[in-house]
Amino acid sequence: MSGPQNDARDNGEAGLLKLDHVTKVYSTGTFGGGQLTAVRDVSFEVKPGEVMSVIGESGSGKSTIGKMILRLSPISSGTISFDGTDVSTLKRRALKEYRRDVQGVFQDPFSSYNPIFKADRVFAMVKSEFFPGTSGPEWRNKIGLALEAVTLDPTQVLHKYPHQLSGGQLQRLLIARALLLDIRFLVADEIISMLDASTRIDVLNLLADLKGRGLGIMFITHDLSLGNYISEKTVILRRGLIVEMGETQKVFGNPTHPYTKMLLASVPQLHHKWEEIAEGLKVPDSVVIDKEAAAKKTYETVSEILAPDADDSVLVETEPNHLVRFSPEEAREIEPAAVAGKTE
Amino acid sequence: MNLEVENLRVYYRTLAGDVQALDGVTFGVGDGEIMGLAGESGCGKSTLGNAIISLTGRMKYIEGSVTLGSAELPIWDFDEMNHHRFNDLSIIPQYAMSAMNPTRKIGKMVGELLDSKGVRHKEYIPELKRRFELVGLSQDVLNMYPIELSGGMKQRAVMVISTLLDPSLLIADEITSALDVSTQKAVAEMLVEFRERGFVKSMIVITHDISILYQVADTILVMYAGKLAEKASADTIINSPRHPYTRLLISSLPEVGVTYTGKRLTGIAGTPPALLNPPEGCRFRDRCPFAYEKCLEEPPFVEIAPGHQTACWKEI
Ligand SMILES: Nc1ncnc2c1ncn2[C@@H]1O[C@H](COP(=O)(O)OP(=O)(O)OP(=O)(O)O)[C@@H](O)[C@H]1O
Ligand SMILES: Nc1ncnc2c1ncn2[C@@H]1O[C@H](COP(=O)(O)OP(=O)(O)OP(=O)(O)O)[C@@H](O)[C@H]1O
Ligand code: SF4
Ligand SMILES: [Mg+2]
Ligand SMILES: [Mg+2]
């Protein structure tokens, strides 16, 4: 059994899913007059058998990225491609094929599940939509395998309504449904936070098994300890902007952007108190908006304390497979050549 | 003022029979102590918190006593408890955020609450504003509707309001669970600060997230399937727990600052027993790797070291 976190060194394999300068602008207000840029110029790629964590505060744009990948929300600019094909061009048959390859599982298993359907009915719907030609025994066998992959006992779950299952069981059932489609990419949006500590790790290990079978996974979470456990790559998102990304071990081991540092300093750790951690993750005074708040004893969130990134800030590769957002001035100091080339 | 809970038993009445959600628990919370209450979903944390303050709906008082300071609380009498609720002890119920009346402005809500307690609410408004400011909320919040506040702002507001009369005990049920890490930290630190400032003396902080408790609680009480499993200082529970359930729980938690390449954590196989007809003996038996014949009898919750209690035959 391989560990949850594989070695993330570039294996030269082509990206499975690729985001290229993706931006999302929502219209807001009663008459759609206002605009809110939820995702700004985001580029990254995920390879087969790789887990990419997307981490950020509430409202940072994580789910919006997931929805664009799943074609549940249109892209404002930029492209998302899967296996080299621009996803937004897909129609009818090709779109259906895409949905067999790429599926999402969301935060609240209870709401994404129709409460009046028993589990077997939900599976039957998958069959009629995607596998009308598959024979009964063959289909049952397939369900058996999918449930086995998520360690659920068919006799215990199939005849049950959602409310008769635990959150962990339901979450695994939804993953099994996605697996039935032989998916190659999974968008997992906060699927762990609703679960109990003792079942969390089972679902995480399940994801680790799936990636062992070549599945690419985008793992959306605000819980950095989960991201650290499961993913080889990490994207830190702030107000729709990537502020730091790269190999998980580098982003977590050598956090460089003040936002990443402050998020890490907020994680409730099991063996270190917040005060202890804060020492090692100090951010420079120059980026603190509210000095008093940062000093001590206020109840403000990272975003309220920290100055936003400038519009002309750029991502700079500070070490191999580790990118950090800097202002143009800082960037020039670090790596003069990088600024001209990389203006993501 | 300290809280003493003695053999408290509270069930839920259902058509199928009684759900034995709180099955004889005995523990104390010292004056000024922040006690964390942890355990997996359905183990009875909210039942315990609610039972101390207001038995409602299907909750049925079976036996036991709750004493705050020197006075026994009439917890079986909802109306009688009205004299204590909000004055002496206060609760922030689980899902309080979503339970706020969406058509009432925050200020109006507070006014009504204070009036219902027979307190002249005008007298408290300056203090309310002062405390709002202290937690980084502007006075404008009083003129806002709950939906206009973010999750973190709502929890800060609820904290201030529930402790406005400086109760001796505050029970905070899952107030950090729906928040992101940075907001979680802000709200959790506020709990400690409120005790420091004397807005509240002791607290029971309920959460399934034991790592938050390590940050803010003095002691942690772990429940399992309607019973107490272990209580000790936060440090002991995290670093040297003795009950098998606590040990497995702690070791299943992923952490930042650890590299997991090639390493896997394991969960706890199985699920807790149904509380409608719970099995005799230790309720963790089915899942416990150390279970033996003795475990068919119920283990008592006893002190195994100063300030450290547990209910496990292997440990006593
Ligand atoms: N359909 C929509 N119309 C308008 N604005 C939206 C819409 N969906 C999301 N937003 C806004 O876009 C921003 C990003 O939202 P998103 O749901 O992607 O954040 P998130 O990172 O998933 O947050 P959370 O952790 O709370 O789930 C937020 O400011 C949100 O209010
Ligand atoms: N109104 C009710 N009627 C019947 N049973 C109930 C009722 N409310 C709770 N229960 C049962 O009582 C037990 C304890 O529930 P409780 O809400 O106290 O758990 P909890 O530890 O707070 O869980 P969570 O972490 O999910 O909030 C559970 O088995 C639950 O199913
Ligand atoms: S009493 Fe027995 S079954 Fe229960 S926790 Fe201890 S060893 Fe395990
Ligand atoms: Mg989201
Ligand atoms: Mg509860």
Image: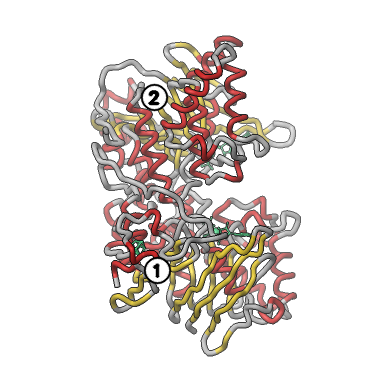
Q: Which mark is residue A282?
A: none
Q: Chain of mark 1?
A: B
- Residue B166 in the image: x percent, y percent? 57, 78
Residue position for label 1:
B297
Secondary element type, mark 2: loop
Q: How is the image coloured?
A: secondary structure
The residue drawn where x is 31% and y is 36% is A4
Q: Is residue B157 found left or right of A222 in the rendered image? A: right
Q: Residue furthest front?
A: B293
Residue under the point 48% across and 47% down: A195
The answer to which quarter of the image holds residue B163 is bottom right
Q: Is residue B296 left or right of residue A280?
A: right
Q: Amino acid at mark 1?
A: Glu
* Residue B146 spot, x, y in % from top left: 67, 55
Disc number for residue A215: 2
Q: Quadrant of residue B81?
A: bottom right
Is B315 placed left or right of B199 in the picture? left
Within 10 angstroms of label 2, few (less than 14), some, or many (20 or more) residues? many
Residue at left offset 24%, top offset 26%: A9
In space, the residues marked 2 and 1 are separated at their CA atoms by 47 Å
The answer to whether residue A247 is seen in the rendering is: yes
Q: What residue is drawn where x is 64% and y is 70%? A: B60
Where's residue B187, x and y in %?
49, 60
- Vertical side of B307 occupied by A161: above or below: above
Q: Is residue A88 above or below residue B48?
A: above
